Image (cartoon, coloured by chain):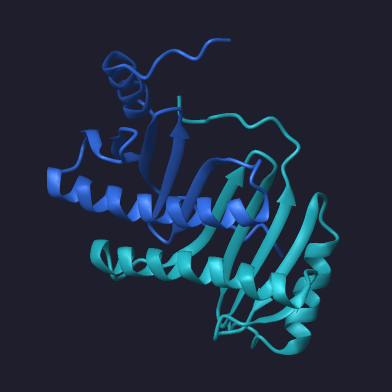
Chain colours: A blue, B cyan
Amino acid sequence: MLQSPRTLTYVEEAFRLIQEKPNVRDIVILNDLGHPVKSTMSNSASVEFAGLVQTLRGRIDRGMQKIDPTDELLMLRIRTKFHEILVTPDAKITVIVVQSADDKFENELF
Amino acid sequence: MLQSPRTLTYVEEAFRLIQEKPNVRDIVILNDLGHPVKSTMSNSASVEFAGLVQTLRGRIDRGMQKIDPTDELLMLRIRTKFHEILVTPDAKITVIVVQSADDKFENELF
């Protein structure tokens, strides 16, 4: 299946679909250079947030290179007391969604 | 509810419980200094893995300090093509679990 190119229309559509989901507080979409191209946040907040996410991704990618170079990051979920941040690389763009986490956090491990 | 102190017995018990879960490939438990105290990996691999996780945590903590100092990291999930890495701060210890991800990854966003 040929993946549809990540045109502005694709970005707008993805943005619209995500906005309709419950508990979504913020959305930031980055281009392949890691710059915000669409966001619910202010420009400065978007740039700062993008910087944090790109730093994390870079660190994870370097770690994965060492552990298994054939592996690939599909999603990063940062769950905090009040929020859940989802980072999804999607071909040339990266979609960041901040959700409010109102459900009681269940430690699934033990 | 008084949280039970993270004694060696607690660490051993958590380790045992997690090992019984399906798809668990590796477990590394760090002490409050970020050093591995119990692991299925070799010592060098554990130390390297702990280093990656602690770097990510440090970066997330600094980011959260700016965004909302009252917030707190509950869990970090790194989903890749072949694995899912779960990082759970638990009082003075940090539990890292590597699971093989054999289910088909569904992009829940859009």
Number of callouts in the render? Answer: 0
Residue A64 image offset from top left, x and y in percent: 59, 52
Could you tell me if residue A23 is visible in this image?
no
Seen in the picture, residue B14 relative to A29 is either above or below; the reply is: below
Pick the quarter of the image with the N terminus of chain A. top right
Residue A102 image offset from top left, x and y in percent: 42, 50
Nearer the observer, B67 or B26: B26
Seen in the picture, residue B42 relative to B92 is either above or below; the reply is: above
The residue at the point 37 percent across, 28 percent down is A18
Nearer the observer, A72 or A110: A72
| Quadrant position of residue B52 | bottom right
Q: Is residue B28 left or right of residue B74?
A: right
Seen in the picture, residue A18 relative to B77 is either above or below; the reply is: above
Q: Is residue A68 left or right of residue A96?
A: right
Nearer the observer, A38 or B47: B47
Q: Is residue A57 left or right of residue B42?
A: left
Residue extending furthest toward the left: A43
Pick the quarter of the image with the C terminus of chain A. bottom right
Residue B12 image offset from top left, x and y in percent: 80, 80
The residue at the point 80 percent across, 49 percent down is B23
